[in-house]
Structure formats: C-alpha cells, structure tokens
Image (spheres, helix red, strand yellow):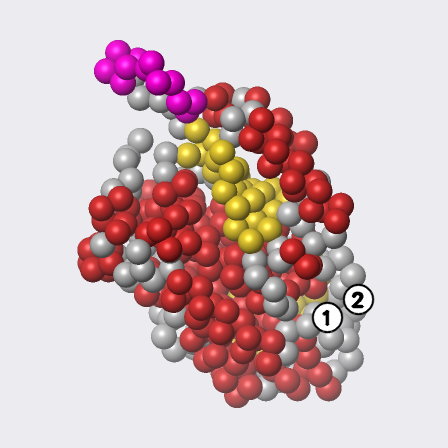
Amino acid sequence: MTALDETLLADGDALAAADVGGVLRALASAGAQVREALDLSAEAGVARLADDDRPRAVVVAALAGSSAVADVLLALAGRNCPVPVVVRHGGPLPSWVGPLDLVIAVSLSGRAPGPVALAVEASRRGARVVTVAGEGSPLAEVGARNGNVQVRPARGVRADGGDPRSSRVALWSLLTPVLLACDAMTLLKASPADLAGVADRLDAEAEASRPWTETFVNPAKNLALELSGAVPVVLADGDLTAAAARRAASMLARTARVPAVSGALPDDASEVVATFGGPFATGGVDDVFADPFLDGPSGPRQRLVVLRDAPGAVRDEDRRLADAVTQTASDAGVRTSEVVADDGTPPQRLAQLIARTDFAAAYLALASGTDPAVSPQVADLKDRLG
C-alpha cells in the first residue's frame, strides 16, 4: 500500500501545487456554489412551483456523481415526506408517472443518457419536469419547454462534459435548485434563508480544512491520516447522516481510490458489527515483536468511521445504538473515527458532514501520490464503452 506523505500533508503550498486539477479549490467553492445557485434558481422561476398543486409523487433522475443529489433529497425529505420519492438512474420511467407527478432530472453536462431519456418521456406524458443541466444541452431543452423549469449550474463549474471530476465537486450547484423546488412544493424545508445558512456552514468548513491549516488543527487532514492504510466502513447514525455516509464512501472510492462501504443505523448494525470479527479487523493489529523484513508489512486494517448528527437532534435510542457499535468496535480492536455535526438546520448539519469527508478524501489522495481529479481506470472504461 502507498504510504501517506505526512510532510506533503503539512505543507499547504506543496498541496496546492500537487492538486493540479484544483479539487481542493473546487471543494472550497461549495458555499459560493450555493449562493450562485440561489440566484440562478430565482432567475429560472423555481419559486413559481409554489403556485401549483403538490405533486402526487416525485421521480428523481440522476446518475453517477450527480446521484448524491437524490441521496440528500431523500435524507432531508425523511420518512414523513407527504408524497413518495422514487429514484431512477436510467429508464424506463415508471408506468404510473403522468400529469399529476413531478420528475426532477439532474446532469451537469445535460447529456447523461438516463436522466435525458427519463425527462423526455416524462414531458411526453405531461408530467411537470424540473431540470438542472448545462445550457444548450438536450436535458436543458426539455426543462425549457412550456410549464417546465430549467436551472443552469453555477458558472464557476465546467458543464461541457470534458472534466471527469466536475459532478463530484459540483454537488451544491446541482443540489441547491432541487432543494428549492421541493421546498416550494412543501416536500421539505429548505428555504433560501436556510440555504444561505448552508453556504455559511460550508464556508466555515472550508476555512477549517484549508491546505495551509496545520494538520493537528485541520479536521479533514486528521481524518485523512486516520484513514491511511485502512479499509473504511462508513456508518451513519440515522436517516439524515446516511446520505453523508454514502457520499463519503463514493468520494473515497472515486477521489482517493480507496474501497469503502457505507451503512446506516439501525438497519445495518448487525452487518457492520459482524465484520469486526473478520480478516480486515485483525489484519493490521500492531505487534511489537513483528519484524517488517521477515514478516512483511501488516495487512490493511479496518477503520470504522461514524458520522453522527448533532447531539440535540439524535433520539436516545439511536445514540445508545451508535455508542454500542463503537464500543463493540473498540473491544474487537477496530479503531474508530467520529465526525459529529454541529447544531443547526438539517441541511446545515448534513452539509458539514459532507464537506468534512469530501476534503478528507482529497487530502488522502494527494498525500498518497494520487491525482484526485482524474482516474485513468475510469477513463479507460469510458473508452471501452465508446
């Protein structure tokens, strides 16, 4: 396994130079993405959705890096959402979708085949369609039709399809218009004022995690250090944080090239705890008598990463379950990292967890000698598929 270069991690200038694709800079723009998306959504007339009746159901069409939009929407809508929310990455469009329903299609380039096909079919059936897509794209054309709403992504994010990292670091450019649309239809609470608070929270996290901040006070660098040489299991303490856990696992894989799995309590408690008795839980146990030349390097070691909601937002039974899982991990010799959200609205708390793990994945990549912007293997796969 590639050793983490702690010297590089401690040198802000060297980190910035190594980050040739500008991933850290793009992640730091998350707050600005929210603010610009608020303006673009207002220009596009998202607020007029409040004049229509609440839809019978919502279908969210998103693919690959944009699929985090659907995860966050489901997390914020919660189990008490007044209408069903269905996620589709590609066709076919559910047969029941019609004029009473809403389809939200998201694609930074506006050319992702699945969302485009779903939006076209939804429009043909008379369903309302909200799109977030690059201008002049096939998806944007559907959103621009009479009765639909089209919002273009923030100007600072490339939407020409030429940059494979864009959708990963453009989350808030894509997500903000979707949350505003759902707020207008009273499906969840994410008003412009709420999202302005999200932008402030993202700015604060970017400041705390900036490359020039000393490692010992930089929460994202610390988390990257803890994940060095580890097999991460990212566990959420509930429905809200589950979206952040899935995002973290995805970013670790795509950005840092580290295989990671995610789960959420209470449903995944047994599966996660069972792994504490497996080979990765014991593969990296420290042995003071081990000879690295004779015995070889220790194997990768499992690391439990628990994403916790703000203390005041967690039910007692959920907190006890999360505590029990971490204690079981400790008893089994599995090390644990915790990321705890500060108090605030649900979107603000979720934004903080996402930002922290996004930065950590980028730092883990850079300090391991990996370009967080481009994966040659992903490029090869795209070439093979034509």
Is the Cβ of the residue at disc 2 closer than 8 Å to that at disc 1? yes
Q: Residue 208: x, y in percent?
A: 40, 62
- State left or right for residue 277 relative to residue 315: left
Q: CA distance from mark 2 to mark 1?
A: 6 Å
- Indicate whether residue 285 is drawn in magenta: yes
> Which of the labelled discs sits on residue 82, or is there none?
2
- The amino acid type of the residue labelled 2 equals Pro
Camera sees residue 115: no
Residue at image coords 32%, 65%: 25
Mark 2 vs mark 1: which is more N-terminal?
Answer: 2
- The amino acid type of the residue labelled 1 equals Leu
What are the residue bounds of the magenta stretch?
284-295
Residue at image coords 52%, 51%: 339
Residue at image coords 22%, 46%: 7
Q: Nearer the viewer, residue 78 or 185?
A: 78
Quadrant hosting residue 298: top left
Vertical relation: 282 (above or below) 361 = above
Q: Secondary structure at mark 1?
A: loop
Q: How many marks?
A: 2
- State left or right for residue 352 relative to residue 87: left
Quadrant hosting residue 79: bottom right
- State left or right for residue 56 relative to residue 287: right
| Residue occupied by mark 1 | 187
Residue at image coords 57%, 61%: 342
Vertical relation: 260 (above or below) 52 = above
Q: Local crowd at mark 2 within 10 Å, few (<14), some, or many (≥20)?
A: some
Q: Residue 192: x, y in percent?
A: 59, 81
